[in-house]
Amino acid sequence: MKHGYIILLLAGTLATSSRLSAQKGSQKPPNIGASFLLVNPDARSSGTGDATTGLTPDANSLFSNAAKIVFAGDWGVSANYSPWMWELNNNKSNMAYVAAYKNWNQSEGLGVSLKYFNYGSVTFRDDNGTVLQDYNPKEFAIDGAYSRKLGKHMSLAIGVRYIRSQLGQGSYNSLQQKPASAVAGDISYYYQNTKDLLDFGNRYCFGVSITNIGSKLQYTDDNTRKSFLPMNLRIGGGYTFVHTADHEFTLSLDINKLLVPTPPIYALDSNGIETSQILKGKDPNRGLVSAIFSSFGDAPGGFNEELREFTIGSGVEYAYRQVFFVRAGYFYEHPNKGYRQHFSAGMGVRVSNLALDLAYQLPTGESLVQKRTLKFSLVYNIGGTRDETVQP
C-alpha cells in the first residue's frame, strides 16, 4: 500500500479525497488535480530554472506561452522525454511530450501538442500486506493553439486542452475511485524587440499567460469532492546581450501564481480532527471565476501568505556560435507551499535546423514530489533560428 499511495500522492490523487496537511505550520499548499500540467517538459528551459518565457521561441513554447510560436519560423516539431521519478518507481515512470507548429502569412500560426505521464505499475496492499490489485496510473493532455501577430513585435494566442487523469481504481476511504476528465483553455501575450543596452542590437522580450482555465476534476463517485485544475498565471521575460557571431548570453526570469483557492484553517474537534467549520480564510468550494479572482486575497495568513504562493524561476543560457549551449538556473517555491526548490544545469548542441538539449535538475528542498530529474529534447525548426534577429 505504501508504495502505491506514494505514487498517487505525487500525482495528486489524494488531494481529491482529503484535505492536504500543512507541510510546515498552519499554511497549506493549494489543493489541485492533474498537477502534471505544471511540469515543464522542455529540457532547454528546464536548464534555466524553468524560466521559459525569455528564451527564443520554438515548438516547445506551446507549453508555457503559445503566442511565441509566430516568431519561431515557418514550422517546427519537438520530441521530449524524461524518466520521471525513477528513484521512487524503479525507472518505470516517464514523461513524454511532442509538439508541432505551422505559421503562414507571416502573422498567424497553429500549434498542437500531446503530454503523456506514465507512473509505472503500482501495487496496492491492505494493512496486512495482502495484494489488492496492480494498476498503471497515467495522465495525458492534448492541446491546440492559435496565435496571431499584432504588428511586428507582439502577438496573442488562445488554446484549448483536453485532460484525462487515470490515477486510481477501486475503493479508497469508502469512496470509489475513477478516471477524471476536463476541458480547459489558455490565453497568452508575447512581445519582443531589440534595444541598445550594454551593447548593440540585443533582443528583449516579455510575456503573460494564463493556462488551464477549465472545469473541475472528479476522481470519485462523490459529487461534492472535486478538484480544480492547476490554473496558472505566468509572467516572464528575458534579455539577450553580447550577441556577437561567437558569443551570446540570455537572462530569463519567470514568476508563477496558481489561480486556485487557498485552503482555509478549519476548527478541530476534541480529538484534534479537522471539522468543516472555517476559522480563518474562505470556503474553497466556489465557482471558476470566483476562484480565479479571489485567489489573490483568500489566504488565511493574509498578504504574507499570498506572497509565498508565487514561485520564481531564473537562469542564464550561453551560446557559442549558436552551435553549443550551456545553461544554469534555480527554481524556488516556499516550503509551506510545496517546497519545490532545485538547481538546474543543461547543455545543448545544434546542427543546422536540428537541436538536441539535455537538462539535469537537483532538488535542494525537502518535498516528496521532487527528485533528481533528467530531461531530453529534440527540436527541429525550419525558417527561423534561435538567434533570429528581431526586426526594428
Image: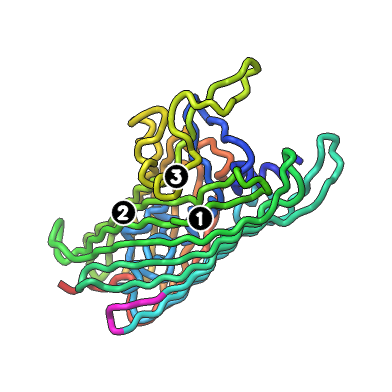
Q: Three-letter amino acid code at disc 3?
A: Val
| Image x and y of residue 10, in percent | 61, 45
User: In the rendered image, which quarter is residue 147 located in?
Assistant: bottom left
Quadrant holding the N terminus = top right
Contact check, label 1 and label 3, Cβ < 8 Å = no
Give yes or no for residue 216 being in the magenta stretch: no
Regarding residue 2, the answer to whether it shows in the image is no
Dot 3 surroundings within 10 Å: few (below 14), some, or many (20 or more)? many
Regarding residue 208, the answer to whether it shows in the image is yes
Q: In this rendering, is residue 123 above or below 392? A: above
| Span highlighted in magenta in the image | 105-110
Residue at the location (32% across, 74% down)? 70
Q: Would you say 34 lies left or right of 101 here?
A: right
State the SS at label 1: loop
Residue that carries the numbered disc 2 in the rendered image: 236
What's the CA distance linking mark 1 and mark 3?
12 Å
Q: How many marks?
A: 3
The circle on residue 215 is 1
Q: Would you say 287 lies left or right of 87 here?
A: left
Quick one: 244 or 366, which is closer to the camera? 366
| Image x and y of residue 310, in percent | 38, 41
Q: Three-letter amino acid code at disc 2?
A: Gly
Residue that carries the numbered disc 3 in the rendered image: 260
| Image x and y of residue 241, in percent | 22, 60
What's the CA distance linking mark 3 and mark 2?
20 Å
Q: Three-letter amino acid code at disc 1?
A: Ser
Give yes or no for residue 107 being in the magenta stretch: yes
What's the CA distance linking mark 2 and mark 1?
26 Å
The circle on residue 352 is none
